[in-house]
């Protein structure tokens, strides 16, 4: 729970009570402006701003389910209290309508609001600080041309002393390095473009880099895997677990389309990211892929050999092989009573996952699934319990949830079978307990995977209205 | 269900044993198919029809083809129309009970059966009540009068002094003769008369009253309601393996793994037709999958480029059918034009097609949810190479079909498999992927409307063109049955022929009811069928009404006129004006009224086929610009279906039609690559789910006592879809001309 | 051999353990309520209750169901004595072809057993997995609301009687 760690960090900082801290922490108010006229922005700049906002995933956090877009109000629950996303529409009273461009740029660069209050690092200013003035200008133009919505975000529900924003300054002192992205001259332009987007607006590390006990990303473990909203964010560095190593091409496809032939479908908090990247220029997605692939590096000969072996497994079941409609399901392997997990897999999962019907509408053969290799089974548990609900009125993979029939013991048996069959890693520790915790709601599993009945948004770039 | 129902006609006719009525089948030679609601091109008209007789009595004039009364006074009604979920069973019994003066509860119904029921062709085109209802109403009135005459003879009283009530004829002195006492051999074996003494609607006690459908209690309590539920003793389960693509041929088949599975009785192969029979259903499914895995096919790319479908359709060779040509010279005015497109769409029955077939003593009996038992009988006999008399088709309900779905093909599959297991009933059901990929689709269409208007924006010249395949490839001959096309000695489908009829086909409703002074309507008929297509509810009517009513709104906007006023301006038919006015009034339509932000109001009207029910729909929607999602909020429909048999049933059909059309309009399109159909389940062919549902859909039925029945089963899809599109257009400020009105298109149109 | 408890009765089932519940209900137990619609868990026609939760019987192998309480639409009442859910669907005439209806009733039953006064929005969200093609949705919604009311009346009168 990154937020919990952040809050603990704040307490620690308060206790430290460094001299001169207040001088560092104090930030001036920037004068309010008259609300900008939409027409005063160049449409091309607004369009570029829209693309950048998509890369920044802004609407996903700044929109409450069913609420007006960017009008804030999304609750981020924590055991200590709740933080609410703010209204970033240009409403003069409840939004950012009175923010000058300078105030906006300062917020992005320093994590400080117009009035000089420190923003909680749930707003990833540690990444956004890398964004250039030019791009901030475009983002500003985009936000200021949105429809103003009067919506007061509920006050954060945090106990003293966590509710003192000055405390954030201490956290910044320890972990925050302000500054626009500086290109690496040893790398080419595309790589630098990708690094700029991935490290800056894209804030990939916010989920994919593990955090230290004070809630900051660990510097030495860049992209080594983290977690978000009850889902594992797998390593995207040299430690990548993907059984079929990622390439620039496959990553580009995945980032833009939300799925890829031999890696599967994006779910959980990654789904809106890919939905957003589907709306940005191909070159930007490709640049991000180029950078991330380079961070992952060339796979080891062992990984390559394994990938070749996995891809060569039964040809009729090879992903991407279009199997005729009548045979789009295949015969389950025989179930042995001694192995409950195998039997469950054979009867309930194999029908789709071994059918050879291509991703995204067919199930991914699990030997190709990164989720089988993860440190925890959080993602498989989320998907098996709650399925992939049908997107409303759009094509999309549909998987039924099995929460109603798989009790914790059967889940544990199934997970154990999957782990041992589809990966070469040691057994997951206590999958039964994690299942029980997720089922009980102890893990704050992302909104898009709520139990039965909830409709998966077809366009998850916005949390949709349940109407 | 234990033993199969005894299928000898005799046992049915013997009934309670007290009385034998001879049953008049038309001579075999005359059993070519027609239907008064003829959507056909493939069928010969029946010999010597009796055009002066009402409804389906034209083709089945004997009264006892329709009505039988046994010695206990219970009545049996025979209809050639199939229950498809439209409530026809109940409606037909209501009609019969009314005119027979019998209690509803004393009547039962026998549905379509080639050995028992009148040949009413297909159950299609909103004709059930119009044809069968009309025939049974007239037959019932005549039977009642025959019974009264019989009583008059027995009682030696003039018929005028007698009256029929509650299943008996009553004399002024109180003497009663029950129908069971009156009926005698061959009494009803007489031909219908051209005119009947029908009850005035003021005297109705049954018709026009809402009555609960007789089939619903069984359906909600798990009764064996559908052909899918039949479980006769000794039954085998069959599955077929379909080719991967329409152009595929089977090269090699490894049957050994499937044959080795427990429970597998037989693998059937004939050319590229492959099937399997097993003792249990799951065994059959597993065997089917093994067979599919062990099959090698040779495939050819035969499908058009999906992304360029409209251009492909417009460039195909075509034959022109003139639907209307009433061109007059017009003073030059402003001209408007619009082109609309629609992809292929599917019926998408929730229950995949199913049939039960039983080869016994040389006769193959097929229980099928077809819309036409007689045409199927003929086509299946041809496919099997046996005389028609060795095939019997009996209608059993299936999941709603909405037209020509896989029913007939599944019947053929079952019949073929049954040949491999004489003496054992074979139940064959399609898999979901088979239904999605192999049912005949509703054709992709392009329409182009052009209008010249005067200085007030009123239409002075109207031009309309449509590009479409035929919307009917029903059997027909054996070649129209899917499996017959894959047999070693394959049958070829009938060549589609262009025919311009009053009812219309692809051109149905292409000629608007509006009083345009000059008009020209052409169907560019496309004989080539790159994808197999046939009848979906309304045939061309949905797309034509959609196009015309969208375009009318464009014209209204150009004329700065209110859409309702603009329509009324062009409507002279008073009944049409009434439904338009009624729907607008009930909706609270006000000229020039602005909808709240991101909301829109839409209106549309059509008279189905220009012959059947009138329907107008007003709708409010809201659109979420950032996601392109549409939600219907409320709708008001006004309907004029002539005399009403069951108002609850009509409301159900009209409401359902609006919801169904919303799904077609917002979401649906078949996808395919150059070789294969790729929309093979609900994940790749999404339809409407509960989330989009309006808060209310109100239906007002305009009473028209003593007017003829007007078919209403398909009247609301066109206006419903068009009203939805017009509402979306108002909400987003732009019109989208290509169906479906998907999220992507709406997002693109709003620029959000 | 698997033992299944269906509608309160125990049945010894002679079927392979990977057999989906749907085929056992229909073929072995001759219970026709649950329907085959897609076999993929996409349409809800096969919905039954397992320990009160709505479950898709077409993708649920019987080996998972030993010791669980399975309820099908036949367990809600009979044609002579329909239960509240069935009564409501009859009164609202909430069917056209009716094929999807048993699945609809079972999913709705799972919701109403927990909350008989569920709101329209809650019903919509809960019913999302189930498809109807005839467009009977409006009446299905009305029937579910009515069923909720009937259940509440029934429980109130039971309480009074008790």
Image: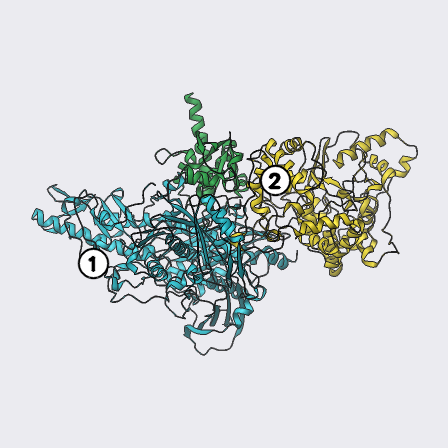
Identify the secondary structure beneath mark 1: loop
* Residue A81 image position (x, y, % from top left): 72, 32
Residue located at (73% from left, 40% from top) = A227
Q: Which residue is mark 2?
A: A384
Let me know if residue A461 appears in the view: no
Which chain's residue wears label 1? B
Chain letter for the yellow part: A
Looking at the rendered image, the disc whose residue lies closer to the viewer, 1 or 2, is 2
Count neighbours of disc 1 (C-alpha within 10 A) and say few if under 14, some if 14 to 19, many if 20 or more.
Answer: many
Rendered shade, chain C:
green
What mark, if any, has residue B192 been given in the picture? 1
* Residue B390 image position (x, y, % from top left): 29, 57
Residue B529 position (above or below residue B69):
below
Let me know if residue B242 appears in the view: yes
**Residue furthest bottom in the image:** B329
Count neighbours of disc 2 (C-alpha within 10 A) and say few if under 14, some if 14 to 19, many if 20 or more.
Answer: some
Identify the secondary structure beneath mark 2: helix
Rendered shade, chain B:
cyan
């Amino acid at each position: 729970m990154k937020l919990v760690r952040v809050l603990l960090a704040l307490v620690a900082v308060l206790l430290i009570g460094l001299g001169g801290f207040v001088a560092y922490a104090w930030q001036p108010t920037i004068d309010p402006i008259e609300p900008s006229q939409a027409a005063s922005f160049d449409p091309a700049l607004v369009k570029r701003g829209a693309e950048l906002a998509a890369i920044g995933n802004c609407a996903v956090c700044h929109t409450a389910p069913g609420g007006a877009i960017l009008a804030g109000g999304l609750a981020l629950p924590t055991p200590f209290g709740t933080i609410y996303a703010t209204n970033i529409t240009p409403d003069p009273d409840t939004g950012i309508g009175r923010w000058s461009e300078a105030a906006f740029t300062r917020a992005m660069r320093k994590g400080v609001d117009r009035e000089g209050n420190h923003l909680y690092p749930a707003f990833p200013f540690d990444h956004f600080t890398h964004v250039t003035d030019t791009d901030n200008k475009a983002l500003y133009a985009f936000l200021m041309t949105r429809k103003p919505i009067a919506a007061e975000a509920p006050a954060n529900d945090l106990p003293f002393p966590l509710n003192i924003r000055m405390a954030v300054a201490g956290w910044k002192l320890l972990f925050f390095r302000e500054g626009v992205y500086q290109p690496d001259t040893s790398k080419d332009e595309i790589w630098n473009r990708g690094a700029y987007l991935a490290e800056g607006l894209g804030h990939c590390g916010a989920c994919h880099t593990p955090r230290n006990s004070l809630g900051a990303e660990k510097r030495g473990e860049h992209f080594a895997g983290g977690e978000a909203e009850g889902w594992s964010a797998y390593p995207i560095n040299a430690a990548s677990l993907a059984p079929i190593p990622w390439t620039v091409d496959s990553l580009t496809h995945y980032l833009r389309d939300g799925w890829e032939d031999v890696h599967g479908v994006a779910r959980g908090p990654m789904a809106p990211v890919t939905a957003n990247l589907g709306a940005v220029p191909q070159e930007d997605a490709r640049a991000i892929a180029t950078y991330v692939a380079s961070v992952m590096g060339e796979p080891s000969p062992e990984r390559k050999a394994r990938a070749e072996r996995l891809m060569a497994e039964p040809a009729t079941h090879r992903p991407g092989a279009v199997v005729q409609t009548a045979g789009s399901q295949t015969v389950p392997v025989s179930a042995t009573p001694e192995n409950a997990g195998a039997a469950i897999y054979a009867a309930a999962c194999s029908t789709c996952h071994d059918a050879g019907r291509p991703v995204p509408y067919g199930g991914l053969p699990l030997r190709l699934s990164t989720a089988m290799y993860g440190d925890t089974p959080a993602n498989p548990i989320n998907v098996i319990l709650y399925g992939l609900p049908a997107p409303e009125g759009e094509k999309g993979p549909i998987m039924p949830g099995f929460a109603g029939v798989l009790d914790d013991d059967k889940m544990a048996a199934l997970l154990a079978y999957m782990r041992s069959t589809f990966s070469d890693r040691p057994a997951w520790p206590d999958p039964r307990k994690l299942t029980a915790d997720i089922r009980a709601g102890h893990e704050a599993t992302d909104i898009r995977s709520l139990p039965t009945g909830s409709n998966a948004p077809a366009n998850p770039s916005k949390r949709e209205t349940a109407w | 269900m234990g033993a199969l129902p005894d299928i000898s006609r005799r046992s049915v006719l013997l009934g309670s044993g007290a009385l034998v009525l001879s049953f008049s089948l038309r001579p075999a030679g005359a059993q070519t198919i027609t239907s008064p609601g003829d959507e056909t091109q493939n069928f010969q008209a029946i010999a010597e029809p009796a055009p002066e007789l009402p409804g389906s009595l034209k083709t089945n004039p004997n009264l006892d083809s329709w009505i039988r009364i046994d010695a206990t006074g219970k009545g049996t009604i025979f209809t050639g129309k199939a229950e498809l979920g439209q409530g026809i069973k109940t409606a037909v019994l209501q009609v019969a009970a009314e005119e027979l003066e019998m209690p509803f509860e004393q009547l039962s119904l026998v549905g379509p059966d080639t050995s028992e029921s009148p040949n009413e062709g297909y159950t299609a085109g909103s004709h059930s009540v119009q044809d069968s209802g009309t025939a049974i109403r007239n037959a019932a009135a005549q039977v009642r009068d025959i019974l009264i005459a019989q009583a008059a003879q027995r009682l030696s009283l003039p018929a005028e002094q007698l009256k029929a009530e509650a299943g008996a004829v009553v004399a002024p002195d109180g003497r009663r003769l029950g129908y069971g006492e009156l009926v005698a051999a061959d009494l009803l074996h007489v031909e219908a008369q051209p005119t009947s003494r029908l009850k005035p609607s003021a005297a109705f006690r049954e018709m026009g009253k809402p009555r609960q459908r007789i089939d619903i209690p069984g359906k909600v309590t798990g009764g064996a309601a559908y052909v899918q539920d039949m479980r006769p003793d000794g039954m085998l389960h069959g599955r077929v393996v379909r080719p991967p693509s329409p152009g595929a041929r089977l090269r090699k088949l490894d049957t050994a793994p499937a044959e080795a599975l427990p429970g597998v009785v037989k693998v059937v192969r004939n050319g590229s037709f492959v099937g399997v029979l097993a003792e249990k259903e799951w065994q059959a499914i597993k065997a089917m999958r093994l067979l599919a895995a062990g099959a090698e096919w040779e495939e050819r790319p035969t499908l058009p480029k999906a992304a360029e479908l409209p251009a492909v359709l417009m460039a195909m060779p075509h034959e022109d059918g003139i639907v209307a040509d009433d061109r007059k010279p017009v003073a030059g005015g402003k001209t408007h034009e619009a082109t609309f497109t629609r992809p292929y769409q599917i019926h998408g029955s929730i229950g995949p097609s199913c049939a039960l077939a039983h080869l016994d003593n040389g006769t193959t009996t097929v229980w099928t949810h077809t819309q036409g038992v007689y045409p199927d009988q003929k086509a299946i006999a041809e496919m099997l190479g046996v005389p028609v008399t060795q095939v019997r088709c009996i209608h059993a309900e299936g999941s709603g079909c909405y037209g020509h779905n896989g029913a007939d093909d599944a019947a053929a599959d079952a019949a073929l498999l049954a040949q491999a297991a004489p003496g054992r009933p074979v139940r064959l059901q399609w898999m979901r992927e088979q239904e999605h990929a192999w049912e005949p689709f509703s054709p992709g269409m392009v329409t182009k409307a052009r209008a010249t208007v005067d200085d007030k924006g009123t239409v002075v010249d109207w031009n309309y063109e449509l590009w479409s395949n035929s919307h009917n490839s029903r059997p027909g001959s054996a070649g129209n049955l899917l499996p017959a096309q894959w047999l070693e000695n394959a049958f070829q489908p009938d060549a589609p022929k262009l025919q311009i009829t009053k009812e219309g086909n692809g051109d149905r409703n292409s000629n608007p009811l509006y009083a345009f002074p000059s008009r020209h309507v052409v169907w560019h008929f496309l004989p080539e069928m790159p994808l197999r297509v046939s009848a979906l509810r309304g045939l061309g009517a949905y797309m034509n009404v959609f196009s015309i009513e969208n375009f009318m709104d464009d014209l209204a906007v150009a004329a700065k006129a209110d859409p309702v006023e603009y329509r009324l301006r062009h409507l002279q038919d008073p009944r049409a004006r009434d439904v338009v006015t009624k729907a607008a009034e009930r909706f609270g339509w006000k000229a020039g009224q602005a909808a709240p932000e991101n909301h829109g109001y839409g209106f549309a009207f059509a008279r189905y086929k220009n012959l059947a029910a009138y329907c107008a729909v007003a709708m409010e929607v809201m659109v979420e610009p950032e996601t392109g999602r549409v939600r219907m909020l409320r709708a008001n429909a006004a309907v004029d279906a002539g005399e009403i048999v069951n108002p609850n049933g009509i409301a159900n059909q009209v409401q359902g039609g609006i919801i169904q059309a919303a799904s077609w309009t917002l979401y649906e399109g078949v996808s395919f690559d150059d070789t294969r159909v790729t929309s093979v389940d609900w994940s790749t062919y999404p339809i409407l789910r509960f989330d989009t549902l309006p808060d209310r859909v109100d239906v007002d039925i305009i009473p028209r006592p003593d007017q003829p029945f007007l078919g209403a089963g398909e009247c609301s899809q066109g206006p419903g879809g068009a009203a939805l599109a017009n509402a979306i257009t108002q909400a987003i400020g732009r019109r989208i001309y290509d169906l479906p009105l998907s999220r992507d298109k709406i997002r693109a149109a709003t620029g959000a | 051999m698997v033992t299944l408890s269906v509608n309160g009765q125990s049945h010894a089932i002679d079927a392979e353990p990977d057999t989906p519940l749907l085929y056992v209900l229909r073929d072995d137990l001759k219970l026709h309520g649950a329907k085959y619609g897609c076999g993929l868990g996409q349409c809800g026609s096969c919905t039954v209750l397992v320990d009160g939760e709505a479950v898709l019987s077409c993708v649920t192998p019987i080996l998972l169901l030993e010791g669980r309480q399975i309820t099908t639409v036949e367990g809600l009442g009979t044609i002579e004595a329909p239960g509240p859910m069935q009564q409501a669907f009859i009164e609202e005439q909430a069917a056209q072809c009716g094929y999807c209806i048993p699945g609809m009733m079972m999913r709705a039953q799972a919701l109403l057993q927990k909350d008989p006064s569920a709101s329209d929005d809650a019903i919509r969200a809960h019913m999302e997995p189930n498809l109807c093609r005839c467009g009977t949705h409006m009446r299905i919604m009305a029937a579910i609301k009515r069923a909720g009311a009937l259940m509440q009346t029934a429980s109130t009168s039971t309480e009074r009687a008790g």
